[in-house]
Amino acid sequence: MVDTENLYDVIIIGGGPAGLSAALYLTRAKYRVLVLEKEQFGGQITITHEVVNYPGVGKCSGKDLTDTMYKQAEYFGAEFLIAEATGLDLKDDVKIVNTNRGDFECLSVLLATGAYPKMVGFKGEAEYRGRGVAYCATCDGEFFTGKEVFVVGGGFAAAEESVFLTKFASHVTILIRGEDFSCAKAVAQQAREHEKITVITNTVVEEVKGDNGLNYIRYKNRNTGEITEYHSKEGESFGVFVFVGYAPKTDLVKDIAKLNEQGYIITDKSQKTSVDGLYAAGDICIKPLRQVVTATSDGALAATELEKYVAKVQSRTGIRTKDPKVREKVITAKAENVSHGDSATQSDGLFTQEMCAQLETVFERMENSLVLKLYLDDRTVSKQLQEYVKALTSMTDKLSMEIVSDKADEFAPCVKLYKGDSYTGIAFHGVPGGHEFTSFVLGIYNAAGPGQAMDEGIRKRIEGIKTRINIKILVTLSCTMCPDLVVAAFHMAAVGDNVTAEVYDISHYENLRNKYKVMSVPCMVINDEHVYFGKKNMQQLLEIIENHIE
């Protein structure tokens, strides 16, 4: 018998513009919808600092635009959950979506997982990723303040992000493989006319290398064969930002639905895939233009087709889902998700009314009390951390604040989570705002219990770690790629007695930035020795740790 109490009409995998638009259309039509997102709701567009070509919106950031989409869908009853889809069972009328937070049932699935940045493949690209080679201007631009920067690519992202990078870089050189930019002339013109930008066409990068960061790049003219070598001045380094397009995130369905040679999912004109009950929208689809406006269009079209599909299944089987407005799962999702990746908005009371309501839901579910111990110094950031923790602990009697030292070690300011006299292994150095607010609150929730759901196999592997493992994660509060790794590390520390996870807002720790030669975030350091760059999920993090134990 089908458990309709926990059944959804549609589960949307992916919380970018396509998924959010579909959620809006479906919930407004009174369908029960769950949106799953493994990282941050909003998708890739959230790292774009300025959107000027979305109809009806004069100018805004990508994050502001998708925040509005999120709130629209939420208003009509959509549910949201940070979770990674790991498998699909689409054989029967009731579909099953496997995730790292448990299994969910539904009558249909919309895949809107988007795409990820491509690598070019030049020599040194992988080796120096995070040490001079970067893929996100918003996340990593500040690391190249006053430095020379090379941008590889000639599309929209390359042109727009090059202009953005001039806020930090001393000069930007754009290396384009083709004859000219491939984006709109208006966007290209901004880059061409900028006094701090040089554009070189018909050029490919062959190699980069360096010591403490990059200090050498070699590129070649495709027409003449001329080789250019650039060496930075002694003691200086430069950056290389790669913007050459995206590859579709279709691994989840590679053995289920039909894909083309490039890995994009094949759909008909109604966004239906080769599998009954599976639809797709956004950048994972075959299409001539990948923009927010086309993603939202795909989402809206897929939603209206899903309405018809679900209605037919309901009519044929008699299966009906419950009214989404009266479900307890809305509260549960908010409790475990805390927010959709937004920051704790700084207001007169530090947190907005909406954030306070969500925090209260988390506090109500906590099984144990925690002590937030502060290690401070005489910097302004220490005062900010003290005010932040004071505001947080004043909202519930399950959290208390204790100032351990006002003249602590070099890694102050810091807040550590204790359960009684026992250190949970979770700490944040700096003020956990921006994109790390959610990560920190989830750390509290996991340390206090019951915490987020975890696969039992993974839990046993973490509990079985007998070697002491210290995880340092260096982040910036503006980085959209950091929270996934931070949440995983905090959760691992909450479960494993021999694991500690300490996060550092790198803007306050220049010594760590220099020690580990960090020019990209997130940067993860295992036991002060092994350095890794890029976002990681729980499974990837666990595999790295197990390799070092072995």
Image: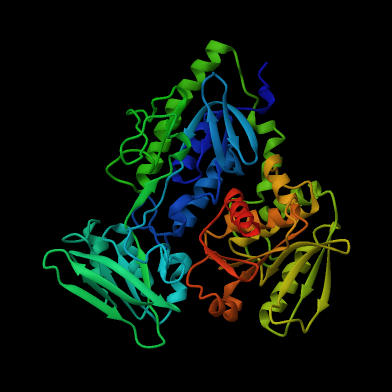
Residue 124 appears at what percent x and percent y?
37, 66
Q: Which of the 4 image quarters holds residue 135? A: bottom left
Residue 205 appears at what percent x and percent y?
27, 66
Residue shown at 31% from the left, 62% from the top: 122
Q: In terms of depth relative to the viewer, which is nearer, 208 or 399? A: 208
Q: Residue furthest left?
A: 224
Residue 536 appears at what percent x and percent y?
55, 54
Residue shown at 53% from the left, 11% from the top: 316
Asked if residue 287 is positioned above or below residue 499 in the image, the reply reads: above
Quadrant location of the N terminus in the rendered image: top right
Quadrant location of the C terminus in the rendered image: bottom right
Tell me if I can see residue 7 in this picture. yes
Q: Which of the 4 image quarters holds residue 436? A: bottom right
Task: Give the mark count.
Answer: 0
Q: Is residue 346 left or right of residue 151?
A: right
Tell me if I can see residue 335 in this picture. no
Q: How is the image coloured?
A: rainbow
Q: Residue furthest right?
A: 420
Asked if residue 129 is positioned above or below residue 444 in the image, the reply reads: below
Q: Residue furthest bottom?
A: 234
Q: Is residue 133 left or right of residue 320?
A: left
Residue shown at 65% from the left, 40% from the top: 101
Asked if residue 494 is positioned above or below residue 276 in the image, the reply reads: below
Q: In terms of depth relative to the viewer, which is nearer, 128 or 278? A: 128
Asked if residue 513 is positioned above or below residue 82 in the image, the reply reads: below
Residue 248 appears at what percent x and percent y?
39, 44
Q: Which of the 4 image quarters holds residue 77? A: top right
